[in-house]
Amino acid sequence: MSIGWNTSGFTCEHIRTVNRLNLWILQSHRTLPYLCLGTSTSSHHRPPQHIPTTLYWPDDELATARASELARKASFRKMLNSPQWWLLLLSILLFALTVNSSHDLTRNENKVKSSVFLSPEFVLGPGTVANKYYYNIDFPRGHIALKEFNAEVVDEAGIPVPLHETYLHHWIVVRYYVPKDAKTSKILSDDELHQSKGFIVRNSGVCQGNSLGQYFGLGSETRKTATYVPDPYGIEVGNPAQVPDGYEERWLLNVHAIDTRNVEDRLGCTECRCDLYNVTEDELGRPLRPDYTGGLYCCYDQTKCRVREGFDDIHRSLYLRYTVKWIDWENAIVPVKIYIFDGTDSVEREKDSTILDAKHHCRIEYEVESCSTTGVVNGGCIDSKKASIVIPRGGHVIYGVAHQHSGGTGAALYGEDGRVLCSSIPIYGEGKEAGNEAGYIVGMSACYPHPGSVQVSSGETLTLESNYSSTQKHTGVMGLFYILVADPPPESMLLLQNSVHESMRFSKYSWGLLAIGAVVAFIVGVGYYSRNKREEQYQSLVI
């Protein structure tokens, strides 16, 4: 057997023992022992490179080594040629890439636009009330999908104001159309809006008239309540095909805030108890009914709750700072319908009319009597109010949240068969800082069902249940429920949405999976490369 040696790194002693070495030596070194000339005895003598010589191996050792090497190479080639191996490797890589890519495509932060706006100024002093309607507010324009709306009360320096100073009873955002030539300054009320031939564009809910037609709206819970619309859904607005000719889309903001600095009864003021406001007539001068002891009719704009004596009457300028997030509309977005249900809703049906044609009377607010008065002490003094409501058009529920006031213990929406569609629980503050005010509801838990897992049918009767603690009397409380419903997509689209949902859940692991796949591919590649290099070395063997 003739061998051509690259003679770097070995001494003559290596040659004397080479016949006792197995072939793994050759596999472990890129260079082989050089030939020591017979007349040289120095272990440091180095002949010229690439000196051809002859070295003899025992036939049995050579055959065994070669057979072993051939078996290893055959096994390695078999692994590389195995469809199962490459399928596993490809699956790891594709899964990691798909998870990361779908996350980027479906919730691409580069596509989401965000703007922060300030409402016009409203001025409050201790005990005073502002219930303002601002027409044509700053708002994103164009054909877009609304993704999120958040708001809070701030002072002139932009510092958030805590609820125990200024109680945010509610804010709502309403969509409306007006003629393009309508002068904004002339529209200051609903009457003037109608006189300008403008009109409100209501949500899909069943309440009628001026009740609960808003697109967004919360109260004291606004800072810690999620409002984002999950991908691939969005609230479609600004569609030119839906805007009547000669009209344009605008937005209205209603802010209802109560200054509770130095008041005698902070809870009583936030619950709008009529005796604390010394009110016997509503905003339009109509006498209040005798059994009406508190609520919106007693804390309208410019009323004042009773304050303690001896404190300065310091007024300050405040604003509602609101943040809107949206994306430009595209066909991949799935539009949703907004439904707002009211726990006080009662239905009136005319003869021969269907349930869908019924008139809904949404009173919005109600009273909770103390259990010491009613004698009802079951369940630890809990007042439970229920309403049955027929949803006109069904679909997939993709979001849900309730709205309650202090004293609320939670609300739930049930399907006709009693299944829970969404349960929303209040979060109470524990401190003094804005967003964590003790005794106030500072957030409501929201529902984000797995796509397709919560469905309602067209014409299905839903039950809204709103629970309050009745250890003491509460006035002007609310039990509302917001849900977003999307039309059922084709089966293929539902599978994609499920994939998107899972990718958003596990996207934080995607780069780890991608790294694992890359490491596996690297190891295989290095191994394959090393094997090829060794094969090139073995080509110098001539038997």
Image (spheres, rainbow, N blue to C red):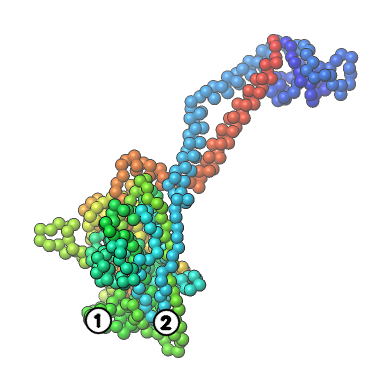
Q: Position of residue 542 (x, y in %)?
A: 70, 11
Residue identifier under label 1: 285
Q: Is residue 475 visible?
A: yes
Q: Which image quarter is the N terminus in?
A: top right
Q: Nearer the viewer, residue 176 or 522?
A: 176
Query: Label 2 sits on what residue type?
Result: Pro
Q: Quadrant of residue 17?
A: top right
Q: Nearer the viewer, residue 484 or 424?
A: 484
Residue at 63% across / 18% down in the picture?
A: 68
Compared across the picture, whether 190 is left or right of 126 comes to: left
Residue at 42% across / 57% down in the picture?
A: 325
Q: Position of residue 393 (x, y in %)?
A: 24, 52
Q: Is residue 163 visible?
A: no
Compared across the picture, whether 390 is left or right of 381 comes to: left
Residue identifier under label 2: 126
Q: Position of residue 232 (x, y in %)?
A: 38, 48
Residue 94, numbered label: none
Q: Position of residue 272 (x, y in %)?
A: 33, 77
